[in-house]
């Protein structure tokens, strides 16, 4: 081997090859042909919250016909897939996450004919549709639960988790939405407790029952046969349970996912589901949650495991939960660790907003009028230039901000309302609670989409189910469409850049200037193409030390238009260079 290398001819050939395929800055090139390319890795997913997107019939609630009327808008964004929050029949205890009939459409939203029309309209525009699948629990108004509840000998009894009262009180389980945080609810009809990790009206389905699993696979087939393109598996990490419900060790509340998630047979069920359902279709599947470790996450999504395609973790999201602010060093650290853990196998999503968290700009950026636009654009640049499939929440492309309700009467979310009542019952600080909700409540992200500056932001001709953010006179789609430098038009440009440059999807990520507390700087590299992304996360001018000479760099985008010539970054400035 050493001998061969010393032959002059061989050296020349190797030298030529190295110049052709690996420019100086890229010593270990990633070969695009070995990337295990998939359509869903390249997808740009737009999350659409149907209740608040567009109301067509004037009842104040968004609906499918409303979405259909805006399909050209969705297409104009350049996104390639839509994730639709639940649209199935539901009494709406938790805005559709409590399903009473998995094969029907919620009356407020329209009919199955509307759904078929919507799916066709998306596909005609080259946009895929991913549905939310809520099967850790159903509604207590689902026929299965009604039957299950009716008698201990019902054939549906084992579709849910029951604990007969003569066995004594079951070991405590915490509930996300229960007013007493208690997941076991006593039901006198059959003298037994049923389990609900979420609200009392969301009883947990019993995945340990093979009959229940077959029912769910049938539901999945029903929608997939219609031609939908995937599922987002809601709260699925909680599905499998140790049905002996043992007592949990002290302090388990601090790591609820570890003790409640990734139950004993979860992977068996996912493998079964994959074999019986997913493998028959060219779809994408994404898990809400990624367990409590990298190993958990890999076990959900690594290709050879034949379970799901990708997951989303909440570590990055949780960093922003403190109203006093967050450390950019922590933020960089989280995203860098997850990127490196998934650099060679598995796939994740990348997002900063959804219907369960406050508005992206209010949480991670700065929604003060002076900085709202720049910081929205900067955060969008981050999402669209990282590895992982971007999930972008509707309204963030306009820079929509938290509404900050100051009265509990304005809140609609069961989590906010039950939390308030629980505290009130205990004589707690409800004023402080409202202050906290202004920052953290899910309702901040659920206010109506702002289409124009007419009444109710053009969302409805009726009374909106939740108040409209009064900044709609300025922050609205119509105004932003016309303004070349708007948040909306910037979003479209960055989406285009991601679609034109596979380096943003598959390229190697390298963090630069790691200890810089203000700037997030990184490169992405693929097949000799190298991009530099510089993001100032602060409201002050920032300096950077990347060690990269920008003389020959090509500016691809800057959210201010032009970068400073001294290399500093303006408040919330975002710049992408091709090196
Ligand atoms: C998921 C949903 C959330 C819902 C919960 C219960 O976390 O995203 O909106 O409340 O599951 O279904």
Image (cartoon, rainbow, N blue to C red):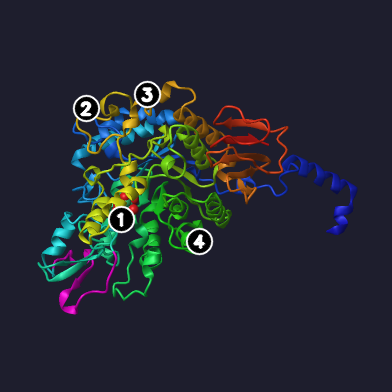
The residue lying toward the viewer, choosing from 404 and 159, is: 404
* Neighbour tally class for label 2: few under 14, some 14-19, many 20 plus, Cα within 10 Å: some
Real-space CA distance between mark 3 and mark 4, rounded to the nearest whole angstrom: 43 Å
Crowding around mark 1 (Cα neighbors within 10 Å: few <14, some 14 to 19, many 20+) is some
Q: Earlier in the sequence, mark 3 or mark 4?
A: 4
Element under label 3?
A: helix
Q: Residue 23 in the image: x percent, y percent?
A: 74, 41
Q: How many marks?
A: 4
Would you say residue 164 sits in the magenta stretch? yes
Say which of 57 and 38 sits in front. Answer: 57
Front disc: 3 or 4: 3
Give the answer, above or below, for where 141 lies relative to 61: below
Q: Nearer the viewer, mark 4 or mark 1?
A: 4
User: In this rendering, which labeled residue sits more in front, label 4 or label 2?
Assistant: 2
Residue sitting at the far bottom:
167
The tag on residue 461 is: 2
Q: Residue at x 34, y 29 (%)?
A: 472
Viewer-side residue, 98 vs 356: 356
Whether residue 264 is visible here, answered yes or no, is no
Segment colored magenta: 154-174
């Amino acid at each position: 081997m050493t001998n061969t290398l010393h032959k002059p001819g061989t050296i020349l050939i190797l030298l030529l090859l190295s110049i052709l395929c690996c420019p100086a800055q890229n010593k270990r090139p990633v070969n695009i042909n070995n990337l295990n390319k998939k359509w869903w890795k390249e997808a740009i997913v737009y999350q659409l919250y149907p209740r608040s997107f567009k109301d067509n019939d004037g009842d104040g609630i968004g609906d499918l016909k409303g979405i259909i009327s805006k399909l050209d808008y969705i297409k104009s964004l350049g996104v390639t897939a839509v994730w639709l929050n639940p649209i199935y029949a539901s009494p709406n205890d938790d805005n559709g996450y409590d399903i009473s009939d998995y094969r029907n459409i919620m009356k407020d939203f329209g009919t199955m004919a509307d759904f078929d029309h919507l799916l066709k309209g998306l596909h005609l525009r080259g946009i895929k549709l991913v549905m939310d699948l809520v099967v850790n629990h159903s509604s207590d108004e689902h026929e299965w639960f009604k039957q299950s509840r009716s008698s201990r000998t019902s054939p549906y009894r084992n579709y849910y988790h029951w604990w007969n009262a003569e066995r004594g009180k079951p070991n405590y389980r915490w509930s996300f939405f229960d007013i007493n945080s208690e997941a076991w609810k006593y039901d006198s009809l059959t003298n037994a407790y049923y389990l609900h990790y979420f609200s009392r009206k969301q009883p947990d389905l019993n995945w340990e029952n093979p009959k229940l699993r077959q029912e769910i696979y049938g539901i999945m087939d029903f929608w997939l046969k219609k031609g939908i393109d995937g599922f987002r598996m809601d709260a699925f990490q909680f599905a499998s349970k140790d049905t002996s419900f043992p007592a949990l060790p002290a302090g388990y509340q601090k790591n609820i996912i570890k003790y409640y998630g990734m139950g004993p047979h979860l992977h068996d069920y996912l493998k079964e589901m994959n074999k019986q359902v997913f493998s028959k279709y060219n779809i994408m599947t994404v898990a809400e949650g990624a367990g409590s470790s990298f190993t958990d996450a890999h076990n959900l999504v690594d290709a050879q495991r034949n379970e799901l395609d990708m997951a989303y973790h909440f570590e990055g999201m949780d960093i922003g939960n403190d109203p006093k602010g967050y450390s950019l060093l922590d933020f960089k650290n989280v995203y860098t660790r997850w990127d490196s853990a998934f650099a060679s196998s598995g796939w994740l999503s990348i997002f900063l907003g959804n219907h369960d968290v406050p508005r992206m700009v209010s949480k991670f950026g700065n929604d003060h009028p002076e900085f709202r636009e720049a910081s929205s654009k900067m955060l969008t640049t981050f999402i669209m230039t990282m590895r992982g499939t971007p999930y972008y929440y509707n309204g963030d492309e306009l820079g929509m901000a938290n509404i900050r309700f100051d009265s509990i009467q304005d809140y609609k979310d069961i989590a906010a309302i039950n939390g308030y009542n629980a505290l009130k019952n205990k004589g707690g600080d409800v004023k402080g609670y409202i202050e906290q909700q202004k920052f953290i409540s899910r309702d901040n992200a659920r206010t109506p989409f702002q289409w124009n500056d007419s009444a109710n932001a053009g969302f409805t001709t009726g009374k909106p189910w939740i108040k409209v953010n009064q900044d709609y006179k300025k922050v609205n789609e119509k105004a932003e469409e016309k303004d070349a430098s708007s948040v909306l038009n910037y979003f479209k440009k960055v989406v285009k850049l991601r679609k034109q440059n596979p380096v943003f999807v598959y390229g190697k990520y390298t963090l630069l200037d790691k200890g810089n507390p203000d700037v997030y700087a990184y490169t992405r590299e693929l097949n000799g193409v190298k991009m530099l992304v510089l993001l100032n996360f602060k409201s002050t001018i920032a300096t950077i030390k990347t060690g990269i000479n920008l003389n020959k760099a090509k500016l691809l985008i800057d959210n201010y238009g032009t970068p400073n010539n001294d290399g500093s970054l303006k408040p919330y400035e975002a710049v992408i260079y091709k090196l």
